[in-house]
Image: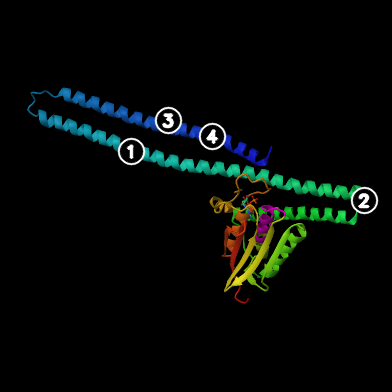
Amino acid sequence: MPYSTLRNKIKARPLRIIFIFYWFLLAYILAALIFWYIDLNGQNQELTQLRFNAVSVNDVHYIQKTNRIQKARDRKTAQYMGEGITFLLMILAGAFYVFRIIKRQLVQSEQQKNLMMAITHELKTPIAVTRLNLETMQIRKLEPTQQQKLIRSTIEEANRLNTLCNNMLFMSQLDSGASSLANERIDFSNLTLDCATDFIVRFPDRKIELNIQEEIIITGDKLLLQLAINNLLDNAIKYSGKEDVVLVKLFKIQKKVKLQVIDQGIGIKTSEKEKIFEKYYRGEGMQAKGTGLGLYLTKEIVKQHNGNISIKNNELRGSTFEIQLRGSKNT
Ligand code: ADP
């Protein structure tokens, strides 16, 4: 069964049952409140009638007494109304609060389940490929070119595992509030070049072009920035075709350092441009492998470096992701 179908099936059922129960309970409480009001009001009317009956028409104080009875009835009606409205507001406020909490909890637990499935999927492929490659090299005597190809593919899978582990590690640090930023001097030009070169080696069949201004220095956390660049490059490769060019541009305008990863791939709908940075969000009907964490973590990393990340359509087709950071004073 495709992963996305499995994900949707798991999502739908418990949510529906819990929400049916919730709405039933809320409707029951509101109905009980309305009946309580009708019942008390009825008793009030009956009591008023009995009091009216007890006053004789010949009584010299008839008008004052009936006025007093009417006032007492109106006071009671106002009291019941006031109490009813107060209870209604309290119930609605409580119901709204509980609704939000339940919804958040359910969404979180679904996301955790989805994440576990996605990670399992992500882990299985590199492990299976690595094992197959190694077994092939062990059993068969291969030509050096074939051997190189298998080694390259094994390294590619190991790198994918490495990125996945780094993403998970950073995410657990974020969740526990334990993420601390190293504040080192980084040659951002070299770092970008190293990351891009790594992808060029990993994907020799892909067209990756570089336009990197030299000696751009920033301060920050090298490992985290490396992770952010790798996530953008990974997506650019993943969401574009074999013939499409991926361009990595790094330049500095005044004190602003701009890193752009430009692809000619499937592009991103305007309605999704905000959502793709949410935790666990994956594009509609996404078939490519992924956990929905890459851009969320990239945005967090950029935020921690007091920068920002934006996305626009590539003029040709595809997308341009731009990270903007502050350049170091001593650049
Ligand atoms: P993942 O790639 O694991 O799904 P990400 O957080 O990296 O998670 O990306 C979230 C979503 O954003 C993806 O599922 C995809 O729909 C969309 N996306 C990210 N990068 C690109 C890109 N370069 N081109 C088109 N869509 C993209």
Q: Position of residue 304 (x, y in %)?
A: 58, 62
Q: Please name the residue shown 85% across and 50% down the image.
A: 134
Q: Nearer the viewer, mark 4 or mark 1?
A: 4
Q: How far apart, in angstroms, are the residues tagged by discs 4 and 1?
A: 30 Å
Q: Please name the residue shown 31% across and 28% down the image.
A: 38
- Figure quadrant of residue 81: top left
The crowding category of the residue bearing disc 2, from other C-alpha atoms within 10 Å (few below 14, some 14 to 19, many at least 20), is: few
For marks 4 and 2, the one nearer the N-term is 4
The crowding category of the residue bearing disc 1, from other C-alpha atoms within 10 Å (few below 14, some 14 to 19, many at least 20), is: few
Residue under pointer 4:
16
Q: Position of residue 89 (x, y in %)?
A: 37, 40
Q: Marks 2 and 3: CB-CB under 8 Å? A: no
Residue under pointer 2:
141
For marks 3 and 4, the one nearer the N-term is 4
Q: For the magenta stretch, what is the residue range?
A: 228-242
Q: Is residue 229 magenta?
A: yes
Q: Secondary structure at mark 1?
A: helix
> Is the image coloured rainbow, by chain, by secondary structure, or in one colour?
rainbow
